[in-house]
Image (cartoon, grey):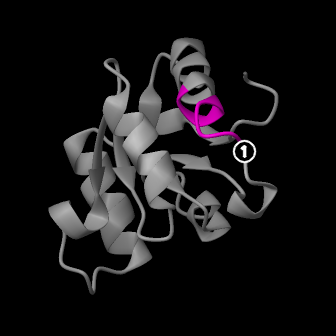
Amino acid sequence: MRLLCDQNVARRYIDACLEAPDLRAVTIADALDPRATDPDIAAYARENGYVVLTADDDFFELSKRCGCLCFHQLDQPRVGDVPTAIRRIDDAYDDRAEIVEVVPNGRV
């Protein structure tokens, strides 16, 4: 799965996804203008085959434009649980643009 990591995702989770051999992750800062709005981010993700990884549940409203994985950093999921959950979610969907899930949310 290709992940577009929102700026509010803690670096430790991004790094865990970068280290996973079957996940490809980029940050919004690497892919877009830092002033990009949420709709801009969703459009970029959709056009380029990314699923947005975010801690911002506003993306659920934009989920028709792109896939969305949201997690609550305040819950402090174990770092390794996030890529494990993402893999399981990826396996459950044929079309990544249809993904609208909370991770890890029992997917580990």
Name which residue type carries label 1: Pro
On the picture, is 107 further left or further right than 44? right
Q: Which residue is mark 1?
A: 77
Residue 65 in magenta?
no
Q: Nearer the viewer, residue 21 or 88?
A: 21
Q: Residue at x 31, y 72 (%)?
A: 40
* Quarter in which the N terminus is drawn: top left
* Quarter in which the C terminus is drawn: top right
The count of marks equals 1
Q: Nearer the viewer, residue 19 or 49?
A: 19
Question: Is residue 101 placed above or below 4 in the rendered structure?
Answer: above
Residue 81 in magenta?
yes
Q: Nearer the viewer, residue 63 or 83?
A: 83
Question: Is residue 43 placed above or below 37 in the rendered structure?
Answer: above
Observer able to see residue 52: no
The picture places residue 76, in percent across and down from the top left corner, at 73, 53
The picture places residue 63, in percent across and down from the top left corner, at 54, 53
Q: Residue at x 67, y 40 (%)?
A: 101
Residue extent of the magenta highlight:
78-83
Residue farthest bottom in this picture: 35
Q: Quadrant of residue 56?
A: bottom right
Observer able to see residue 29: yes
Secondary structure category for the residue under label 1: loop
Q: Residue at x 82, y 28 (%)?
A: 106
The picture places residue 61, in percent across and down from the top left corner, at 61, 64
Q: Residue at x 24, y 69 (%)?
A: 29
On the picture, is 93 further left or further right than 32? right
